[in-house]
Amino acid sequence: MTFKELNLIDPILHALESEGYTIPTPIQQKAIPVLLERKDLLGCAQTGTGKTAAFAIPILQLLYQDKGLSKGPRQLKALILTPTRELAIQISESFGAYGRNCGLKHAVIFGGVNQSKQVEAIRGGLDILVATPGRLLDLMNQQLLSLQHINTFVLDEADRMLDMGFVHDVKRIITRLPQRRQSLFFSATMPPEIQKLANTILSNPVKVEVSPISSTTEMVEQMVYFVEKRDKRNLLIQLLRSPNVKSALVFTRTKHGADKINRDIVKAGIRSNAIHGNKSQNARQSALNGFKEGKLRVLVATDIAARGIDVDNLSHVINYDLPNIPETYVHRIGRTGRAGASGIALSFCDSEERAYLRDISKLIAKNIPSVNYHPEMELK
């Protein structure tokens, strides 16, 4: 199937062609026709499945088609709510790319930066707004933003909203939306609390599910090193010195750990930076851009900061600390092996993390091959 077979309008088809997109991913094939019929949708899809385009493309098409019918000043019609600044920026960039020929205006708002430019964009008139919950509520409470004309609402990464404690903010925002609207709900996992939230937002939704939430793509080769905590640093540096590691996203459990590991990598003469919630938005965006552009070989990240990272041709994901939530492992390694490319996921497991590894193996229904490591060995 091609995008043309999804009955997309020429302005969007031309934009997708410019981006090099020809074949829709499974979630795009399933979701786009449903959304073009203005139905509610419950999407269960893990990271790297093409989910953003699955909702951005039909939103752009419907707004473009409705544009000729509307009179008067531009009114905000579509709201996309997402948990992190990085993800909000990424989604906004996607709307810009796919909608470049549609004459629609979009903006992104998030906390951690001065609000003046964001307020200016809102006052200039918008069709589409991508937002994080805190900043959106803040601007609404200042009477700078109204949701009364919203006809399409997207709640993205709902499980991460729950993890980050945003569910109460999300519920407050929902009470300010018009009752009559099209609602889209996306979550990589569907625990009971998330299903309950979905039930309050959606009306007779079509459920779209691609790749079981517990699965890891076959395009990613997985290996685990059993290593003592004190030896993790030396193992990481040796791995990163290999020319086979063209780019690596290194995951840590804590912000402090991310900074410490990054200092060790830089000290070893490897181009690296860290990204986490304590860094300013400008510092985070600078690090992310440097990694995307290849100026940095390594990015050290915490899970929350990394959720919005979408990097083409990422060769390696390294779990310096194993996650204590097994689904997080699936999300982490899904950063590589995307869009048909292959990738490698390496995990370090110390004696205290064996239980985490057992939980991960149970979730993905397979044992991860192990590599014996001794501190004195040289890795080629």
Image (spheres, rainbow, N blue to C red):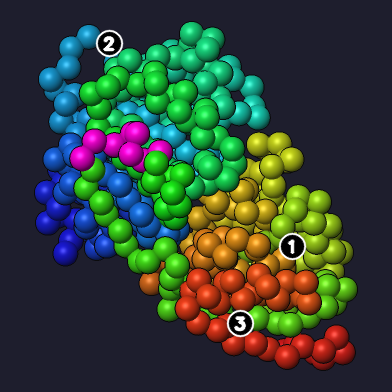
Q: Which amino acid does label 1 sit on?
A: Arg
User: Could you tell which of marks 2 and 1 lies nearer the N-terminus?
Assistant: 2
Mark whose residue sits in front, 3 or 1 = 3
SS for callout 2: loop
Residue drawn at (85%, 86%), measured in percent from left and top?
375
Left or right: where does residue 76 sit relative to residue 217?
Answer: left
Assess whether mark 1 and mark 3 are in contact (beta carbons under 8 angstroms). Answer: no
Q: What stretch is highlighted in magenta?
A: 197-204
Q: Is residue 200 magenta?
A: yes
Cα distance in 3D space between marks 3 and 2: 56 Å
Instruction: Classify residue 110 by image quadrant.
Output: top right
Q: What residue type is labelled 3?
A: Met
Residue identified by numbered label 1: 271
Residue drawn at (83%, 78%), measured in percent from left and top?
228
Residue 27's spot in the image, x, y percent?
29, 57
Q: Specify whether residue 12 is in view.
A: no
Instruction: Classify residue 154 by image quadrant.
Output: top left
In this view, 83 is above or below 377: above
Cα distance in 3D space between marks 3 and 1: 24 Å
* Nearer to me, 149 or 240: 149
In this view, 28 is above or below 178: below
